[in-house]
Structures are given as C-alpha cells and as structure tokens.
Image (cartoon, grey):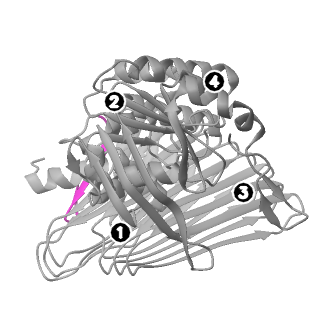
Amino acid sequence: MLTLRGVGLNLNGDNGDAKEILKNINLTFESGKLYAITGPNGGGKTSIAKVIMGIYQPTEGQIIFEGEDITNLSITERARRGLAYAFQQPPRFKGVYVDEVMRIANPDIDEMGIRSYLRDVGLCPEDYIGRDLGSSLSGGETKRLEVAQLLAKDAKITIFDEPEAGVDLWTIQKLISVIAGRHRGNDQKTAVIISHNEQFLPMCDEIILVADGEIQEQGPSAAIWPLIRDDIICDCRIRNQCGGGMIEAQQYR
Amino acid sequence: MKLSSIDNQLLEAVADLHGVPQGAFNIRKDGEGHRQSSANIEIVPKRDKPGIDIIVKPGTRNESVHIPVILTRSGLKDLVYNTFIIGEEADVTIVAGCGIHNPGNQDSQHDGIHEFIVKQGASLKYIEKHYGQGYGKGKKVLNPITIVTIEKGGYAEMEMVQIKGVDNTVRNTEAFIHENAGLKIVERLLTDGRQEAVSNVTINLIGADSSGQVLSRSVAQDESKQVFRALLVGKNRSTGHVECDAIIMGSAQIRSIPELTAESAEAMLTHEAAIGRIAGDQLIKLMTLGLDEQQAVDTILAGFLR
C-alpha cells in the first residue's frame, strides 16, 4: 500500500548547518496491518511520519502510495488520497469547535457519528462536542480529540504519533482497543503507531526500530519486542553529562 | 417598509435580519428611520438632532430591539445621535450595526454617537456589526463614538465587530462603571487591502467592586493598518483585564497598546497582548485533514474572529 524507497532527509540545525535526519529509509506498509515505530528520542520516528505526510520534503528517495509516486504531492493532496497523521503535539485553535474540526476530518459525518468517536476516545460527547479547541483543554484532552479526529477521518493509512503521550492510564487501554479494532484485519486500512509504550508495541503486527535516522530492526512483533523490551523501558541512550558527549549505554541487541 | 435585495443583504450582514423584525425596531436607511415601539421598549426620535432615544422600561426581561443603519447611496454622510436608557432591573439585547453599500466613486460615511445608560441592576447585551460592500472607488467610512455609564449593580456586554469592507474607521469608546457594576467589551476586527482602523477604548472603574474587561481579536491582511488602544483606569477597589490578540498577514501593520492606570491601591488591573502570524502547525494540521492552504487560513481566521 505504501512504500518508502531510499528516503533521506536533511534539515537545517539551529546553527544553519544541514543535519542528516533520515538515512536511506526503506519501508513497506501493507493493508490490514498495525505497525509500531519505536526508538529513542530524536532518532527519526516523527520525521518518517512527516515525510510520509508531506510535512517534510525528502532530500532523496521516493514515496509510493497505491502505485503512485506521491513524493512531490502537497500535504493536502496526500490527505485527500487517504493518508492521515495524528500529531504528537496537536496545535490549539481559538474559536474552532470540536464538532467543526470533526466535520473537516470527515465532511459526511453526522452528530451521532461525532458522539460515537468522542466516546471511543473516552470523552463524554455532551461535555466536548461544542468545546473550543483553544486553551481551555488539557494536553491529554487535546490528544484524545486528535485521535478522535483521525478515527473520524477513517483514512487508508493513519499514523498516530505517540497517542499515549499525556493520556491517563485508563484511557491508554481504550485507545489501544479502538485503534486495533478498527485496523487489524481490515484489508482497506493500515495503522502506524509511533510509540514507546509497552502496551502498544506488542499488540502491533510489526515493529520498526529507528535510531540515528536509520532503521535498526524490523520484523514481526513477536520476534522484535522481546529483543528490545528492556531497552525501551529503560531508554536506549543515556547522555553522559560529565563527559559532554553521548555514549551508547546499551546496544539494541 | 419596502426593502430591496441590497437592503436585505446589508440587514442580514449587520443584524442577522431577514426582513422587518418583530417587536421594537428602528431601521435607518439612507438617513431616514422606520421604527416601531413595543409595550416595554419605546423608540422616540430626537427633536433637536438626528437620532433616537431607546427607552427600556424598568423590569423588562428577555426582550430585544434591532436598530440597524444601512446606507445604499454613494456620497451619503450620515450622522446620528442615539441614547439608550435601560431601566432598573431590565435585561435586554440590542442588536445594532451599520452596513454600507457604496456603488459609486464618492465616499459614504456613517458617524454614530451612542450613549448608553444602564440603570441600577440592569443587564444589557449589545451587538454591533459593521460591514461594507460595493465596488465603486468611494470609501466606506464608519466612525462610532460610544459612551457607556453603568450604574450600581448593572452589567453590560458589548460585542463590536467589523466584519469586512470598511475602508476607514475610528472607533472611540469610553465607559464609566459604578459600584458593583461590570462591563465586558469584545471587539473583533478584520481589515484588508489598504483599510485603516483605529480603536480607542477607555474604561473608568469608578465604583467599589466594579469590573471591566476588554477582549480584542483582530486580523490585519494585505497592506491594512490597525491601531488598538485600551486603557483601564482603576479609581476604586476594582478589577480589570485587557487582552489584545492579533493575527498579522501580508504587509499589514498593527499597533496594540494596552494601558493600565491605578488610582487606588485596591485596583487589580492586568493586560496581555500578542501579535503574530498564523502558526504554521495550525495550517499544517488542517491541511492533513484535507483542506487546502486557503481553506485552512479561512478556517483559522473565522474561528479566531468568532
């Protein structure tokens, strides 16, 4: 369904120098599967998502979706072809209401549908359907509304960027159930979940481990998860503050 | 009263009216008023100058009055003095607004001088929208002066909106808030092209436990210019807050000047002001939902000015 071929990405750092963010990324996402992308902070997970969505333009390589080269398509064109991205830190909007943005995500949705998606992410429709997406919402509420929008959009490929971040423990399980329930075995849909969460990772069909802008490991969850589990929980890298440099505290394997 | 399609367009834009309303109203078209009083709201033409007195009987509850002004001819200069007296313990909504259709090359101008007296314990919701249309070279000019007095225990919320199409506006608002009374002013302003807008708001917190709040949201596009000054004067034990939030686009210019003056040690006054472009992540977010860039901008601006 979606293939990344030799994708590289350079971005300018704070000092203006180009920094290599992604190196020769080759990935294929198939229909009906759940994928997890995991790895240390700053390793390139979100950059892969943004390259897929067109937010970052790759420096090299190709992105093929349903047989079409979409490398040079805009964000809007990709969204209209069936790609969707739930932001790690969703922006806030003054004066834009929950039901309004849900209808932007899915113009065919009715109020019953909106209420259903809000319940799916553990939000009481009565309390949220007319709420402003501005500053009155907590980070966790904003995050759950972001997931609700993407569920409503019902795209062919949906990338959830750390859906658990800022969300309470009780809701994480609900999010896992609803994302898995909507995507697993559905041959029209694919979910890609960027996560560090030990509940999300094992329930995915495949895990892709990304660090230093490269794919370190990729394979069935049953094979990859046990290999990386301890490192995920402990965090793979530790900054050596005294030495001023970065050391590899543990290898992935 | 016969209304043309242009009249109806203007009335809908400034007062959400579809034809002549029920209840009390005063529709002023090209300098001539058409009015109707109700049992509790009396509308009386002034004898010494153009304009009307709107007198709401004490205790009147849940009633509204529409007093829109429309100008449909090029070159018209309209000046009007309106006085609003909201009786004790009344609770009413007044929908005003001015729409100018200027099809010609001469400037059309409406200057409204409004005085509000909100009597003891009364509550007022006032909505005023300004709008201009027409593709002649003549400018659409609106210069309102608003003077508000809120007596003991009274409250007013004033929503003043410039929708679009007004080439020049200078808006002066001054309020005097007495004991245990409050005023909230919400101003929303959109300018584009080479339009210019100046708004000066002063709230004098005179009485003990009085309160004042000014919330301004504006969008300046193209080469338009805006100046917003908001002054709170705490003369007694009082609370006040000014919040000015603006989006700047193109080559526009915005000056935002919140000012606080405390003449009492028990005055608690705060302000915040921000001017900035539309945040890139907001645009990207809406584009990932399928909107194109212009649709995303329109959605963000509509929400911001809502």
Is residue B177 placed above or below B40 in the rendered structure? below
Element type at marker 1?
A: loop
| Image coordinates for residue B123, horizontal then vertical, percent | 57, 40
- Chain under callout 2: A
Element type at marker 3?
A: strand
* Residue B76 counted in the magenta span: no
Callout 4 amino acid: Gln
The numbered mark, 2 or 4, whose residue comes first in the sequence reads: 2
Callout 3 amino acid: Gly
The residue tagged 4 is: A199
Element type at marker 4?
A: loop
Dot 2 surroundings within 10 Å: few (below 14), some, or many (20 or more)? some
Query: Residue A97 versus residue A44: which sits nearer the camera?
Result: A44
Q: Nearer the viewer, mark 4 or mark 1?
A: 4
* Marks 2/4 same chain: yes
* Marks 1/3 same chain: yes
Query: Disc 2 to disc 1, how far (Cα)?
Result: 63 Å
* Marks 2/1 same chain: no
Query: Disc 1 to disc 3, how far (Cα)?
Result: 35 Å
The residue tagged 1 is: B49
The residue tagged 3 is: B240
The numbered mark, 1 or 3, whose residue comes first in the sequence reads: 1
- Chain under callout 3: B
Dot 1 surroundings within 10 Å: few (below 14), some, or many (20 or more)? few
Marker disc for residue A154: 2
Query: Residue A132 versus residue B211: which sits nearer the camera?
Result: A132
Q: What range of the chain is rendered magenta?
A: B23-33
